[in-house]
Amino acid sequence: MSQLETAMGMTIAVFDQYARTDGNRQTLSKAELKTLLEKELPNFLASGKDKGAIDNVFKNLDENGDSQVDFKEFVIFVAALTCCCHKYFEQNAAK
């Protein structure tokens, strides 16, 4: 598999790993999203200063307001975060 195919497979696998803990394999609950962020993106929440960060992330991801984050909503989040990281690294490489 190519690197991109591997990355896509890993994105699916990570979502599936955390989505199944409450019995619904199709979505992430707020608790599942919190665990995923803490384990898979520890630097994203590294500051720990904003206690409402998980609530804010969850609210912003839950586009359809069903109190669950589905795979499409999750992928949009991963893509947006990846874009931010890309921009950050481009700016720092220019310095």
Image (cartoon, rainbow, N blue to C red):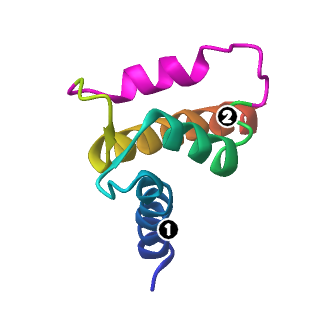
Give coordinates of residue 74: x percent, y percent. Answer: 38, 43
Q: Farthest residue toward the bottom?
A: 1
Is disc 1 surrounded by few (<14), some (14 to 19) or many (20+) residues within 10 Å?
few
Q: Which residue is mark 2?
A: 44
Check the picture and name the quadrant holding the C terminus: top right
From the viewer's perspective, is residue 27 above or below residue 57?
below
On the image, which quarter does residue 79 sit in? Answer: top left
Q: Residue at x 37, y 56 (%)?
A: 23
From the viewer's perspective, is residue 88 above or below residue 56?
below
Is disc 2 surrounded by few (<14), some (14 to 19) or many (20+) residues within 10 Å?
few
From the viewer's perspective, is residue 85 above or below residue 36?
above
- Rendered image: mark on residue 10: 1
| Residue type beneath disc 1 | Met
In the image, is 51 to the left or to the right of 31?
A: right
SS class, disc 1: helix
The one nearer the camera, 78 or 51, is 51
Check the picture and name the quadrant holding the N terminus: bottom left
Q: Is residue 62 magenta?
A: yes
Give coordinates of residue 54: x percent, y percent. Answer: 56, 25
| Residue type beneath disc 2 | Phe
Q: Residue at x 46, y 67 (%)?
A: 13
SS class, disc 2: loop
Q: Residue at x 49, y 38 (%)?
A: 83
Q: Farthest residue toward the front?
A: 23
Give coordinates of residue 75: x percent, y percent. Answer: 37, 47
Mark 1 and mark 2 residues within 8 Å of each other at the beta carbon: no
On the image, which quarter does residue 16 sit in? Answer: bottom left
Q: Is residue 68 magenta?
A: no
Span of residues in magenta: 46-64
